[in-house]
Image (cartoon, grey):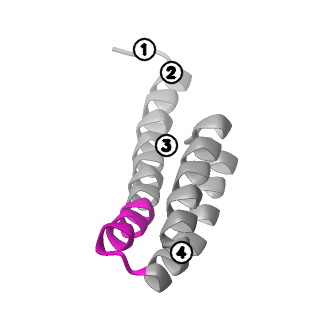
Amino acid sequence: MANHDSAKKRIRRNARRAEINGDRISRIRTFVKKVEKALLQGDKDAAVAAFAAAEPELRRGVNKGVLHANTASRKISRLSARVKGLAQA
């Protein structure tokens, strides 16, 4: 257990940041799931709209430090390709 006040504060702060970051990741996953659901249903308009909402969330996750930049770029690229493929079909 921490003995110094600064170490105790660090423990409290880490717990709070972990909670906030978990909420952010959960929010991002929800937006991505909406895109995937629209893709599975074959709904082009819903997929395009959901992707337009999900992309900024992924980029915001990078800015906030909860996602690695390459991870977000990969997810955006793959979702974009799937949405584009659905739009052409």
Q: Earlier in the sequence, mark 1 or mark 3?
A: 1
Q: Residue at (54%, 47%) from the top-left corner? A: 75
Q: CA distance from mark 1 to mark 3?
A: 21 Å
Q: Earlier in the sequence, mark 3 or mark 2?
A: 2
Query: Where is residue 26 drawn, in percent x and y?
Result: 38, 55
Q: At label 2, which amino acid type do we have?
A: Ala
CB within 8 Å, label 2 to label 1:
yes
Q: CA distance from mark 3 to mark 2?
A: 15 Å
| Label ID, residue 87 | 4
Region in magenta = 30-43
Q: Residue at (61%, 63%) from the top-left corner? A: 55
> Residue 53: which quarter of the image?
bottom right
| Label ID, residue 83 | none
Q: Residue at (58%, 38%) from the top-left corner? A: 71
Query: Where is residue 35 drawn, in percent x and y?
Result: 43, 67
Q: Give the residue pinned by disc 2.
A: 7
Q: At label 1, which amino acid type do we have?
A: Asn
Q: Earlier in the sequence, mark 4 or mark 3?
A: 3
Q: Give the residue pinned by disc 3.
A: 17
| Label ID, residue 3 | 1
State the SS at label 2.
Answer: helix
Horizontal side of residue 84 vs 44, given as left or right: right
